[in-house]
Image (cartoon, rainbow, N blue to C red):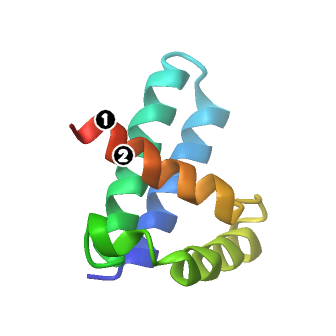
Amino acid sequence: MNYYQNIKDILVKNEIYKQVKDYSKNKHDLESYYEVGKLLIEAQGGEKRAKYGNQLIKEYSERLTKELGIEYSPRTLRRMRQFYVMFQK
């Protein structure tokens, strides 16, 4: 599984969705951020190991920002991961 590509695809779809239609935007944002958080946890080898996966998040942040032209800071990606952890329970 290519976690980076899946994360990028979700974020690209989310940005397209924002531009095309504002209806239900918040719901779609939350769903997208939840899915990205889930994929980040999986890419880092699970919730317990995810706490130590900040290098992966930094790498994804740099790549997403470069390729999408939209800044996804490491902090933002960590918050998406945290959002998933909070709401999966």
Three-letter amino acid code at the position of disc 2: Tyr
The quarter of the displayed image where residue 52 is located? bottom left
Q: CA distance from mark 2 to mark 1?
A: 5 Å
- Which of the 4 quarters of the picture holds residue 4? bottom left
> Residue at 77% of width from left, 59% of height from top?
71
In this rendering, does residue 12 appear at all?
no
Does residue 62 appear anywhere in the picture? yes
Q: Residues at badges 2 and 1 in contact (C-beta under 8 Å)?
A: yes
Where the C terminus falls, by quadrant?
Answer: top left
Check disc 1: other Cα within 10 Å, few if <14, some if 14-19, many if 20+. few
* Rendering coords of residue 19 (x, y %): 67, 35
For label 2, the SS is helix
Mark 2 Cα-neighbour bin, 10 Å: few <14, some 14–19, many ≥20: many
| Percent position of residue 26, x then y | 53, 23
Between 17 and 76, the residue placed more toward the observer is 76
Q: In the rendered image, which residue does mark 1 sit on? A: 87
Where is residue 87 shown, x and y percent of the image? Answer: 31, 35
Which residue is located at x 41 percent, y 54 percent? Answer: 37
Q: Amino acid at mark 1?
A: Phe
Q: Which residue is mark 2?
A: 84
Looking at the image, residue 14 sits to the left or right of residue 64; the answer is left
Callout 1 secondary element: helix
Which residue sits at x=44%, y=75%?
Answer: 5
Q: Nearer the viewer, residue 67 or 41?
A: 41
Q: Position of residue 62 (x, y in %)?
A: 71, 77
Q: Which quarter of the figure is the N terminus placed in?
A: bottom left
| Relative height, residue 30 to residue 6 (above, below) | above
Check the image and report above or below for 15 versus 1: above
Figure check: 22 above or below 10 = above
